[in-house]
Amino acid sequence: MQRETVTLRRDCEGILVPSGDRITLKRGQEAIITQALGGSYTVMVMGNLARIDGKDADALGKEIEPTAKRRPASRVRQASMAHFTRMGNL
């Protein structure tokens, strides 16, 4: 993907790379999309890199992709517990 300069259409949350600190990116702010991968975006804003989740793609003027269906957390936990029990770890 080539870098693309966009103007944020609304406020959205970003996560600074690499610190993981959460920030609010403001409507009207200019951002450069440096990467679009796995449903999220990496942008450069005011000299900092930030990750924007796919649910906020519309803030960048992009289409929000439908989320993948996942098993509810409780079922995942149950499957993990069953696996560990079979393995003799619990």
Image: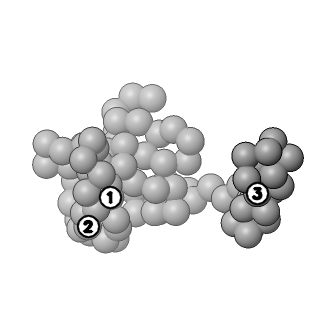
Location of residue 31 with respect to 70 vertically, above or below: above
Task: Identify the coloring.
Answer: one colour
Indicate the quadrant where residue 13 lies: bottom left
Mark 3 or mark 2, whichever is nearer to me? 3
Q: Give amino acid for label 1.
A: Gly
Say left or right for 19 vs 46. right
Which of the two discs, 3 and 2, labels the residue nearer the N terminus? 2
The residue that disc 2 covers is 24
* Residue in the image at 25% along x and 57% along y: 21
* Residue in the image at 43% along x and 46% along y: 41
Residues packed near mark 3 inside 10 Å, few (<14), some (14 to 19) or many (20 plus): some
Residues packed near mark 1 inside 10 Å, few (<14), some (14 to 19) or many (20 plus): many
Location of residue 57 with respect to 1 vertically, above or below: below
Location of residue 67 with respect to 87 vertically, above or below: below
* Residue in the image at 25% along x and 63% along y: 23
Q: What element carries label 3?
A: helix
In the picture, the quarter occupied by the N terminus is top left
The residue that disc 3 covers is 81
| Cβ atoms under marks 1 and 3 closer than 8 Å | no
The x and y percentages for residue 5 are 29, 43
Label placed on residue 14: 1
CA distance separating discs 1 and 3: 34 Å
